[in-house]
Image (cartoon, grey):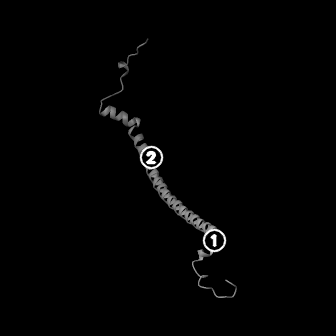
Amino acid sequence: MAKGTLPGPNDVGWPLARFSGLRLLLVVLLVMACLGSALAVITASHLTREQYADLQRLESEHQQLQTEWGQLLLEDSAWSSPARVEGLAEDRLEMRLPEVVDVEVIRP
């Protein structure tokens, strides 16, 4: 089409009709690469958000388990205190320290 003239019926059409076969293939490949790259970014972002949500859930569970572990340690120390064990031995099992006269020393 010459400069300053109106386009003819064959000059107007789909824009890709103006490209040669090799250039058209290159343009199509570049468009496909851009679309593929965009889909990869979307997928990576989605997976990152899912994994971050899992991380938050696991950190919350970890905190709850740490709290429970601390409570269990306190409970264990309370149940196994020497004064409590001695009191239970005296009350329930009727155990006592032997008198001096009841102690026998065996020598090899």
Residue 99 horizontal/vertical position (percent): 36, 22
User: If the image is split into quadrants, where does the N terminus sit?
Assistant: bottom right
Residue at image coords 50%, 61%: 46
Of tags 1 and 2, which is closer to the observer? 1
| Residue 70, numbered label | 2
- Tell whether 9 sits left or right of 64: right
Is residue 40 positioned above or below 92 on the image? below
Is residue 12 positioned above or below 64 on the image? below
Q: Residues within 10 Å of mark 2 (few under 14, many from 20)?
A: few
Residue at image coords 37%, 37%: 84
Q: Looking at the image, do the residues carrying marks 1 and 2 touch, with CB atoms under 8 Å apart?
A: no
Residue 108 horizontal/vertical position (percent): 43, 11
- Tell whether 55 sits left or right of 78: right
Helix, strand or loop for disc 2: helix
- Tell whether 44 sits left or right of 102: right
Helix, strand or loop for disc 1: loop
Residue at the disc numbered 1: 20
